[in-house]
Amino acid sequence: MDEERETLQRIVSTLVNKNDEIHNFIDMLNHTISNVQANSSNAISELDEEFDGLYSILHEMKGSMANTIQQEEARKIQALRDQLSQCNRALESSEELLELAVQSLDIKNPVELLEAARQIKDSVTVASAFRLSLQPKVSDSMTHMMVDFALEKRMLQAVKFLPVPKAPKIDAEACLVADNCITVSWRMPEEDSRIDHFVLEYRKTNFDGLPRLKGEQRWEIVDYIKATQYTLSGLKFDTKYMNLRVQACNKAVAGEYSDPVTLETKAFLFNLDNTSSHPNLKVEDTYVEWDSTGGKGQEKIKGKENKNRGRCTNRTGSKSGQHPVRKSSRRSNTASPKRALARGSRDRFAGESYTVLGDTAVESGQHYWEVRAQKDCKSYSMGVTYRNLGKFDQLGKTNSSWCIHINNWLQTTFSAKHNNKAKTLCIPVPDRIGVYCDFDGGQLSFYNASSKALLHTFRTKFTQPLLPGFMIWCGGLTVTTGLQVPSAVKTLQKNENGLGCSTSSLNNVA
């Protein structure tokens, strides 16, 4: 009995679930029917608007052309009336001469007859009747004002519903990746005058080739592109590649996406290694600030309140013009720089070093990153170092580290440092500084990141992997990574290397 009851309960549960599914499906069908009716009404309304617009254009054209015909009619009638008036005046003058000539025939006196004949002859010679053209000045034909709508009728009869646009084709060879910008070019497989705009979608990835279905970032969308080319600017290249695809849209519908194209976005990406940082530094990804309380626990900086806590002086935070803290990926974006070994085995920087290193080493190639200091920073440095920098060492005071140093305590000083030697740089300190490292070429250069003006260059031979290094006292630094070497820097480097001259007196072959 219990078994039958349990079986019956399962049947009841199954029927209830099935009934719910059918109810939901009925609701969906009713909703779909309503949508079909609403969308059909909208399509008819739009059709009425299109035809009303067409009627309005035809009515306007009819009025304009009828007005032209009426103007032509008025011109011809006026010309004929002028000619008619001239003929009437000539006829009246001719009839007067005729009457005078007839009367002169009755003159008996030969002398008087001769005089009368001479006068009549002179009058006839100058009479307008004999200088008058007896052809109409204008034709009565109006055939040149006729219209033929045969072609237009065939065009109207060929009007159909808008077709779905074909998928565009991205021209991979015409695409350009430079200066953290991507210029994408595409074309339609055939001419389509009804295309209204294009939609470009892009997605960052670490996989070469076609996009993956799982584990990928969402597509970013750029809509309403009128041209067949678009430049994505201000990108941070924190992955190895980027997928791109395009679709064409007409007034009614969007077409299929183009075949996706994958472009390499090589750049130097790193974060700050908080396991190496001085206890008085708070570090999060690419932001570091000095903390007089000792940075207990190395808590992550979250929010403006935490940023303002423990600094030397009151600051205005974002008003200083610095970039916001970036939540960047921990994955490397280039094959040549390698992630530094875990630093749990080494001591943190201590004493007055106030230093933190990058977590990715440079072992080959050319790389670039930028640094922005808060306006109230008292002292800060940026450069590169070998891994053997001691826990009490400061950047630029060893033969294995190179940097530029800015001191805003009492008065501003700007200098390049290496092997405990300093060279004063008699130039203004930029708001943002670019660091260019050519490992194979043995060159470390610093630039005004905005104007790309060269600030200083070290020339040496690097014999060990290099880590980006930063020192900060009283203030904060934001490091921007995932950047390509700017084209302007490449040009300046090419020109400088061509001259074969050095801009540093601190060069040392290590």
Image (cartoon, helix red, strand yellow):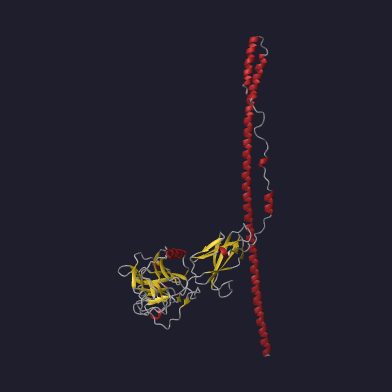
The relative height of residue 508 versus residue 133 in the rendered view (above or below) is: below
Q: Is residue 305 visible?
A: no
Q: Residue at x 58, y 75 (%)?
A: 214
Front one among 30 and 55 = 55
Farthest bottom residue? Answer: 1
Front one among 186 and 292 = 186
Q: Quadrant of the N terminus?
A: bottom right
Front one among 432 and 417 = 417
Q: Is residue 77 left or right of residue 352?
A: right
Q: Quadrant of the C terminus?
A: bottom left
The relative height of residue 45 versus residue 206 in the rendered view (above or below) is: above
Farthest left residue? Answer: 410
Q: Residue at x 65, y 73 (%)?
A: 25
Residue 276's image quarter? bottom left
Q: Position of residue 76 (x, y in %)?
A: 63, 35
Q: Position of residue 27 (x, y in %)?
A: 64, 71
Front one among 311 and 40 = 311
Q: How many marks?
A: 0
Q: Position of residue 200 (x, y in %)?
A: 56, 64
Q: Is residue 167 left or right of residue 289?
A: right
Q: Is residue 161 left or right of residue 446?
A: right
Q: Is residue 287 visible?
A: yes
Q: Position of residue 26 (x, y in %)?
A: 66, 72
Farthest front residue? Answer: 500
Residue 31's image quarter? bottom right
The relative height of residue 123 versus residue 178 in the rendered view (above or below) is: above
